[in-house]
Image (spheres, rainbow, N blue to C red):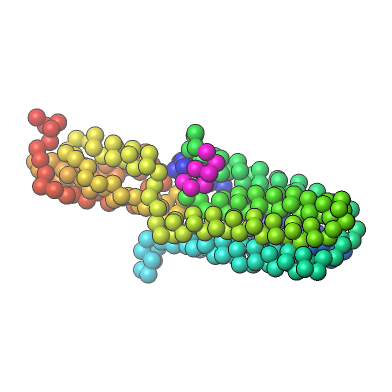
């Protein structure tokens, strides 16, 4: 994941929210008119997605609060907390309701009324969801390391906001196709059970998205290190400085997508005076911040007994 890519998460949230609110209203109205289980499931799905966008927006606002006495490192990781909440909502309400509706409709199948309305709404939903998905994918792709696969990018991302929208919109587009397939098979076979089966398919999609998101958000909430390439580059930047004998360890942790804490255990030359060491540490901090703009805090800790500076010989 590129640490220098500028996230567009707020814009991604707004586009997804606009799309989901309109789609949710249309699907729920169509569900009432047609009696389709898959359409009702999709309507609730879009409504939950809209609530999730509001939660993500709230999380971004909370994460932007400045540090205070109670939270000296800031509130950035609250963004990851709200991503966990979103994942639980997708699983509990989205997948849970879809599965329930599917089982009920399979046990008590009812034919879909006015299917042309259902197909019309699904076609519009597909276009709007696709528009939102395209924007989310472009934002996600801009942050992904060159050469990384789609799933590797998901595993490596630190931007859960864009990830939530990307996965939700992917499930939304897929869900529209599943709903259309279910209604289509019902019309082709005359068996209304297919509509309920489509709801179960949508439930499976949402459960997969929720589990994937929960796994990624949990790791970031606990604390994930920066990209290994960034860690290696930080080590190289420090070790090449005159007055540094060795770099014992480099520890990093993401507080937010573009906020990284760096702790470097440095073995300085033992012939450095205190004022020279202070000057060297200040110079290293300036260089690291210039090279890696995502670094929020830097701690260069002296360790070891030191050794003569090889460059001084």
Q: Could you tell me which residue is drawn at 38 percent across and 66 percent down?
A: 71
Q: Residue furthest right?
A: 114
Q: 31 or 205, which is in the foreground?
A: 205
- Estimate the x, y position of residue 153 in percent, counting from the top left: 51, 43
- Magenta segment's dominant SS is helix
- Estimate the x, y position of residue 312 in percent, counting from the top left: 11, 32
* Residue 313 located within the stretch drawn in magenta: no
The answer to whether residue 15 is seen in the rendering is no
Q: Could you tell me which residue is drawn at 67 percent across and 60 percent down?
A: 203
Q: 154 or 3, which is in the foreground?
A: 154
For residue 256, which quarter of the picture? Answer: bottom left
The answer to whether residue 262 is seen in the rendering is yes
Q: Is residue 82 left or right of residue 252?
A: right
- Estimate the x, y position of residue 27 in percent, counting from the top left: 79, 59
* Residue 155 located within the stretch drawn in magenta: yes
Q: Quadrant of the C terminus?
A: top left
- Estimate the x, y position of residue 287 in percent, counting from the top left: 31, 39
- How many numbered marks does the figure carry? 0
Q: Could you tell me which residue is drawn at 70 percent across and 60 percent down?
A: 200
For residue 93, which quarter of the picture? Answer: bottom right
Magenta region, residue range: 149-156
Q: Is residue 120 left or right of residue 308?
A: right
Q: 183 or 22, which is in the foreground?
A: 183
Q: 201 or 12, which is in the foreground?
A: 201
Q: Is residue 103 left or right of residue 115?
A: left
Q: Could you tell me which residue is drawn at 69 percent across and 49 percent down?
A: 174
User: From what the image shows, is residue 87 above or below residue 291?
Assistant: below
């Amino acid at each position: 994941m590129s640490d220098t890519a500028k996230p567009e998460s707020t814009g991604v949230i707004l586009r997804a929210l606009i799309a989901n609110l309109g789609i949710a209203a249309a699907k729920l109205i169509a569900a009432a008119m047609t009696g389709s289980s898959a359409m009702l499931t999709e309507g609730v799905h879009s409504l939950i997605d809209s609530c999730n966008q509001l939660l993500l927006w709230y999380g971004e606002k909370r994460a932007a609060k400045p540090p205070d006495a109670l939270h000296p490192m800031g509130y950035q990781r609250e963004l990851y907390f709200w991503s966990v909440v979103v994942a639980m909502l997708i699983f509990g309400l989205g997948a849970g309701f879809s599965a329930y509706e599917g089982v009920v409709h399979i046990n008590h199948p009812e034919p879909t009324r006015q299917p042309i309305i259902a197909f019309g709404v699904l076609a519009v939903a597909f276009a709007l969801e696709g528009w939102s998905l395209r924007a989310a994918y472009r934002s996600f792709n801009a942050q992904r390391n060159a050469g990384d696969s789609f799933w590797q990018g998901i595993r490596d991302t630190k931007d859960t906001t864009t990830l939530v929208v990307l996965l939700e919109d992917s499930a939304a587009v897929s869900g529209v196709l599943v709903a259309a397939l279910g209604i289509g098979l019902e019309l082709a076979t005359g068996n209304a059970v297919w509509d309920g089966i489509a709801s179960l398919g949508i439930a499976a999609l949402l459960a997969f998205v929720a589990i994937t998101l929960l796994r990624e958000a949990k790791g970031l909430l606990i604390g994930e290190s920066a990209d290994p390439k960034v860690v290696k580059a930080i080590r190289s930047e420090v070790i090449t400085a005159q007055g540094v004998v060795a770099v014992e360890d480099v520890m990093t942790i993401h507080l937010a997508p573009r906020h990284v804490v760096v702790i470097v255990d440095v073995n300085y030359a033992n012939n450095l005076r205190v004022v020279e060491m202070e000057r060297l540490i200040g110079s290293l901090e300036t260089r690291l911040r210039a090279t890696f703009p995502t670094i929020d805090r830097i701690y260069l800790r002296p360790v070891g007994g030191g050794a003569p500076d090889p460059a001084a010989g």
